[in-house]
Image: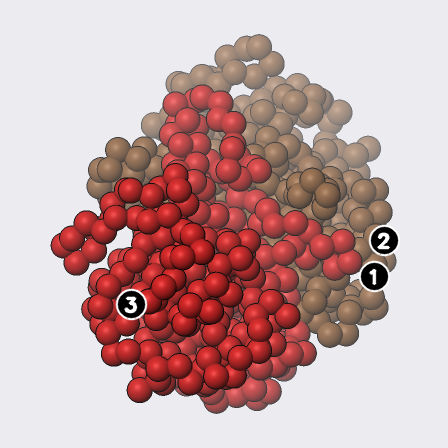
Chain colours: A red, B brown
Amino acid sequence: MLIENNPQAAARVIPANPVVAIVGATGAVGAVLVECLEARNFPLSSLRLLASARSAGKTVSFRGRDLVIEELTEDSFAGVDIALFSAGSGLSKTYAPIAIAAGAVVVDNSSAFRMEDNVPLVVPEVNAGAMEAHHGVVANPNCVAAIATVALAPLRAHRKIQRLQMSTYQAASGAGYEAMAELNDATAAAQRGEEFEPKVLPHPYAFNFFSHNADIEADTGYNGEESKVIAEIRRIFDQPALPVGVTCIRVPVPRAHGMAITVELDEALSPELARDLFANAPGVKVVDDQERNYFPMPVDASGQDDVLVGRIRTDLGDPSGKSLALFVVGDQLLKGAALNAVQIAESLMQRAQ
Amino acid sequence: MLIENNPQAAARVIPANPVVAIVGATGAVGAVLVECLEARNFPLSSLRLLASARSAGKTVSFRGRDLVIEELTEDSFAGVDIALFSAGSGLSKTYAPIAIAAGAVVVDNSSAFRMEDNVPLVVPEVNAGAMEAHHGVVANPNCVAAIATVALAPLRAHRKIQRLQMSTYQAASGAGYEAMAELNDATAAAQRGEEFEPKVLPHPYAFNFFSHNADIEADTGYNGEESKVIAEIRRIFDQPALPVGVTCIRVPVPRAHGMAITVELDEALSPELARDLFANAPGVKVVDDQERNYFPMPVDASGQDDVLVGRIRTDLGDPSGKSLALFVVGDQLLKGAALNAVQIAESLMQRAQ
């Protein structure tokens, strides 16, 4: 058990104007966490930006002021009410228990605790109730799992989901700032006709796509990213045996993930009704203009809170007629990471009041 | 009926050193047809390059000589034994009957005749026998259908295919030279931070992906590209009722198509056996290095005759265990178009001897 059982943690009172810390403030997700807190007028009394010694002393603009980044140490969490972690599994495992001991509630964007029994894995639109029973940490899901579950939630509210088949079109941002820069640099080199040696990702990224570079698990042949997507969707939907097949592919776009999803339901649901359900669902925007051939695209999803859902149709691959096909695109840094974490924090505060 | 019934056409003797014509010689596929004929030492006695009046007089290098492009007219086919058409459906409908009447056998790369009863739709590795009964035209399939069927054929030889689910990662070349140029120009503009108005494709192409721009069919919600893929796979496999679901997405790569495929079989087939079947199949190359995380990619498939197959694993989305998941990448201009057409011509010549 990585997080000690501590049922009292869920009863901690978070003040109406909490002190918030961001661990990993200089990363791609960290930067968007700062933007989200500002854009959503998060009622914090002060914001502490924590990062490695290398980044300490740099400044980040927040609400018109320059905040100085501090080095992350064991003493960083004194007085912190909510700590948003986005600095990788290793640092989460080391510092989340320290933050909890100091009195903070942790929202963790890494995969460190996502499958721990005493750590809720939450997409607020889908399973906010799971937060009731946290022990100091709420886990923020993998980006594909977060975007997929918020898109599928409106269907799940009306039908039982029996099976999922997904193929992803994943952006550079999932591998951080460095991968976004590499996409840009590799593309520029290709356009100049120059060689480019990949440093961040293991394969050429300019005008190319490739299977997600997470390690392949020998027993299944699935890679680590795909296994996370499967396990986390099952956990968020509380359907531990849900059959999910997924192929994760990295494509050369900066920060929005796409996914072609086929969802088998226990009973047929017409595309028209599905479209209505999506149109009335939180966190989802229908982009499904068949006449103008206008559907979800990264250029439209990037920088947008809502997950775009389109190509809504009855799947011709399922002779029973009980499956729908969808194409979904969501901002990897927003709903896939920072926005969902801030929404968890907002939800924690509402629950604590 | 677009092509007149003419069972004698199949018995036409094609000389050992035929006169070959290419209709649409200046297009992206036309240029690769010329390359394929040269690379494969096609035993032609002379090559005629036909195109619009606008291109007439230009020259194209073939076997060390410059061939002059002629204007396509009703008189272009006198003495032609094999006519390779790649100039769009409209020109095929007009000129294929003229070419047949002049004594040629037509291999047509357009979608004009693909679903005609008296026109075989052929991927030589899969259904070369269908050519026996042509009436002057053999149709070359849609690029996704050709690449998918050559990849699936080795499985189909051992098991019955019961269901297919596919998501595509399609290159610019499917929309011609102009789309390939637009990908390049749009990307260069994006890197300079400049606006770019798409002219060839309806959506921004730089660092973006979008649903294939073929018109959406109101009754199904599938687009024209997807409908072609479904109908043509069924026809090539001679399984008119095969359930096929597909989502076609255009991604920013120049000339190789990818596809994530889940194939349900009538009985389980181990990934190990599948890998052996692929390794021994014509037109297929296994790229499935789980340890090095090396799988099919456009940068490797481009310019290569073989279709690359990898990520071979039992699909976790099918609780019966009877489905395999694959990731396939093939050159859209080669196996997806020109190469397959030249292979059809080669096969026609073998059959005529």
Mark 2 Cα shell of 10 Å, populated few (<14), some (14-19), many (≥20)? few
Residue A273 falls in image quadrant: bottom left
Q: Residue furthest top?
A: B64
Tell me the element at label 1: loop
Expressed as whole percent of the image width and height from the top left, the position of residue A227 reads: 63, 62
Tell me the element at label 3: strand
Q: Which residue is mark 1?
A: B269
Residue A44 falls in image quadrant: bottom left
Front one among B148 and B33:
B148
Mark-to-mark CA distance, 2 and 3: 58 Å
A290 versus A194 height, above or below: below
Mark 3 Cα shell of 10 Å, populated few (<14), some (14-19), many (≥20)? many
* Amino acid carrying mark 2 in the image: Leu
Q: Residue at x 51, y 73 (%)?
A: A121
Front one among A113 and A220:
A113
* Label at residue B7: none
Q: Quadrant of the C terminus of chain B?
A: top right
* Label at residue A19: 3
* Label at residue B273: 2
Describe residue A104's horizontal placement relative to residue B327 as left or right: left
Describe residue A350's horizontal placement relative to residue B45 as left or right: left
Q: Name the mark nearer the viewer: 3 or 1.
A: 3
Expressed as whole percent of the image width and height from the top left, the position of residue A54 reads: 39, 39
Q: Are marks 2 and 3 in contact (CB under 8 Å)?
A: no
* Amino acid carrying mark 3 in the image: Val
Q: Are marks 2 and 1 in contact (CB under 8 Å)?
A: yes
